[in-house]
Structures are given as structure tokens and as C-alpha cells.
Image: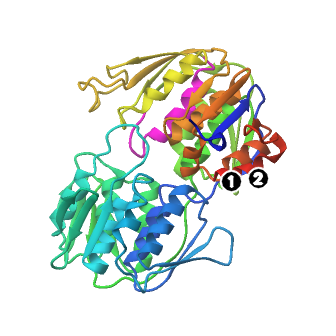
Amino acid sequence: MTDIADVLLVHGGTPLEGEIRVRGAKNLVPKAMVAALLGSEPSRLRNVPDIRDVRVVRGLLQLHGVTVNTGEEPGELVLDPTRVESANVADIDAHAGSSRIPILFCGPLLHRLGHAFIPGLGGCDIGGRPIDFHFDVLRRFGATIEKRADGQYLEAPQRLRGCKIRLPYPSVGSTEQVLLTAVLAEGVTELSNAAVEPEIEDLICVLQKMGAIISMDTDRTIRITGVDKLGGYTHRAIPDRLEAASWASAALATEGNIYVRGAQQRSMMTFLNTFRRVGGAFAIDDEGIRFWHPGGPLNAIALETDVHPGFQTDWQQPLVVALTQASGLSIVHETVYESRLGFTSALGQMGAHIQLYRECLGGSACRFGQRNFLHSAVVSGPTKLQGADLVIPDLRGGFSYLIAALAAQGTSRVHGIDLINRGYENFLAKLEGLGAHIELPGVPAQHAKTAAAAVA
């Protein structure tokens, strides 16, 4: 049975209007926290959101002897790794299944302690994100790995050594693993076909502040010259462009008007172009971006997801909800995660007309085309959405269900909202501040902000 605190009633049909703030990127902040393990001095990280992934990493760092304190300003953490030590396996294992971030502890712990233990990993079920490549990379650096019933035990009998690595796909996680391992490895590491997302660049900025030597070429090649010692850093995390785009899609789907304080144009240029093609309007200033539905029909489009600088896969699910309100046939080709379109079945229950296909319906073939995955969609609109019972499947799909419920007529019962806390800070309070009619069962709607803290 679902915990009552993990269920949200959404009374739809009201445009979202007002202002919210996005803080540091979920895909950067936990990794920057892990990077602090590599230093011989304390680090100071600013613009940290209060999300579950941050709390998981904070707990794991503390288990390994890192002191983590709040700083002088809101959203600031001070991380002191001067007394890093081995953690109890049972304590580490208590975090198994809650996040995929622990895999990135491998390189730093091998450098600091000579060994590491990684429990079973969790995360969103949106397709294959194999961890074997992480371990293959670590073996290339000279680590030995023993598979045990409760996880993986790694050792570095000698100092890790730089190597040449070519990724079969520009994976963000694999690129992060190489960066966090190579900076203290002996010699030069050359990583080709690397991910170049803004969050990767920001992680490189963090490591460079610590004393690392890293260069990025225009051909997706990153070269890291290992150093003997790293210090600390002071860094303000880039804002979360993925969360910002989610609120933009919410404004469009509900015919609303949302000012996203903290959103930045540079990292969202591809999304902004697509948002404008669909018919959405936006205005940019020095503090953020305002997104709104200008009235009139929305436009159907053809869309393909891709690695940066293409249209990000995390932008796709929230925007698909808005596309159910566009006139005509929209085609969506998902090329990053093979199972990411599975969330559309619930939209169908709400009245959306979405057909999934195994073929590549985009302009180019992708790696899923011959593998029998439903990775293309045709969205026919506009359709009136109706409230329904919804069970959240993953982080972005979950927020997309909230958008659909807010755009729908009637009341929806959304189960599993705690999963959204992984990447959306104070989302219930933000929704209420935008005029959403929401309530936790048994809790008056006007107390949703207090209840939100309990859910978080």
C-alpha cells in the first residue's frame, strides 16, 4: 500500500502563474561534492539545492570521515576531507538503491584510501545505464575489482596510471568517472568521444580550481595530466537547466506564465529554440527567464533528443505533455534512453493520443533502431486531458505527470511523489506558490508547504 504522505491530489485546470527559483544543477552538485574527496583542504560549494541526491552524497561523505557543514549563506556547504577514512560496509549498504552517485566515489577513494566498496545502485528506470563500463575504466587505470554478494570491492595496489580511453557513446556518467579518477593518476589520460554537457564543463572548472590540469578539445576529446596533490575549491554551481525547462513546459501546458529565477540562456539555447517553435513565448533578463503561453494554438513539431548540444533527453518528457495540446502530429524520436517513452501510457489514460513505434522516426538512425525498443512517438493533438490515478515511474516522468494533472480537467491522484524530491527542490511549495490546487490526503491544502517539508 502506498504511504499516504507519498500521494498528492491535483485539482487541474488552473494556469500556473508566478515566480520560482532554480538553484544548482542536480547533475553537477552531487558530483562536485564527490570531487571534494580528492582535496587535501576544505572546499566550499554554493547554490546547493535541498534534494535527495545531495542528502545521499552528504551521508556517504560523512560515513567516510568528511565533515560537511552548512556555510554562511543559504545553499552553501563546507566540505572538509582532511580525515577521510574507511566506512563500515553495512553503513554504506544502507544507501544501496537510493542513488547511482556512489559509483563515482570509486576513483577518489582509491586515491585516498587504496580501496573502495560500492553497494548496489538505484536511480530511475528509464533504460540501460550499465555500470560495467565504469569498472572497465577503473581496471584500465590499474584498479582490481572483486564482485561480492553485497556489491563491488575495489583495490589499487599501486598508484593509478593514466591511459587512453574512447567511449562508445558520449556518456555523462562515464566521463565523470574518468575525470574524477584521472586527475590524481600518474601520467596523461586521453578521453575521446567524451560528454561535453554544461555540467561536465562545470565539474572541470571545479577540478581545475583544485589544481587539476584538464583541457577540452572541440572534437569531444578531454586530456587530463595527473598531479600529485589537489587542494580545495570555492565554487558556485551552475543553475539547473533541466528543472528550468520543466517549469517552462508546465507554463506552456497549463496556459500559464512562470518566471524562472536563476535560469540562464546559454545552457538552454537548444531548448529555447524548440520552445519557440512549439509556440511558447519567453523573455530573458539578467536574473532569469519568463516562460508563458501567448494564446492561440500550439504548433506540432518533429523532435529528436541527443547529447549536448542537442535537445536533452531530460527536456523531452515534460515537453511531450505540452505537445498533447499542439495542433497536428508531433513526432518524437528518443535516442538517449530506450525506455524513456514508457511514461506516455499514463498520458493515454488521461485522453492523450500517443502511439509508440520501434522504428527511428527521426532524421537519422540511432542505436535503438534495430533493437526492438519503443523509442519513437507520434503525438496527435490537441486533446483534452482528464484527471486520473497516476503512478510516478521516474524523476522526469514524475514531474511530467504533475504537469499533465495540472493541465487536466478534474482531479488526479498522483502516487510516488517522493521520487520527485531527487531532483526538484521544494516542488510542492513551488507549485502552491504558482497557484496550483494541490493537497496531500488528510492535510488541508493551505498547509501543503509544511507537509512538503515532511515529504522531503
**Does residue 67 appear in this view?**
yes
Secondary structure beneath dot 2 equals: helix
Tell me what residue is drawn at x 36 percent, y 33 percent.
335
**Does residue 274 appear in this view?**
no
User: Is 185 left, or right, of 333 in this rendering?
Assistant: left
Say which mark, if any, is on residue 264.
Answer: none
Q: Amino acid at mark 2?
A: Thr
Residue 71 point in image, percent of width and height: 63, 77
Residue 237 point in image, percent of width and height: 55, 64
Secondary structure beneath dot 1 equals: helix
Q: Amino acid at mark 1?
A: Ala
User: Is 360 left, or right, of 452 in this rendering?
Assistant: left
- Residue position marked by numbered label 1 in the rendering: 454
Residue 293 point in image, percent of width and height: 71, 30
The range drawn in magenta is 304-326
- Residue position marked by numbered label 2 in the rendering: 450
Decide: marks 1, 2 in contact (CB < 8 A)?
yes
Q: Which residue, as the protein is rendered here, is positioned at the far front?
A: 1
- What's the colour scheme? rainbow
Quadrant location of the N terminus in the rendered image? top right
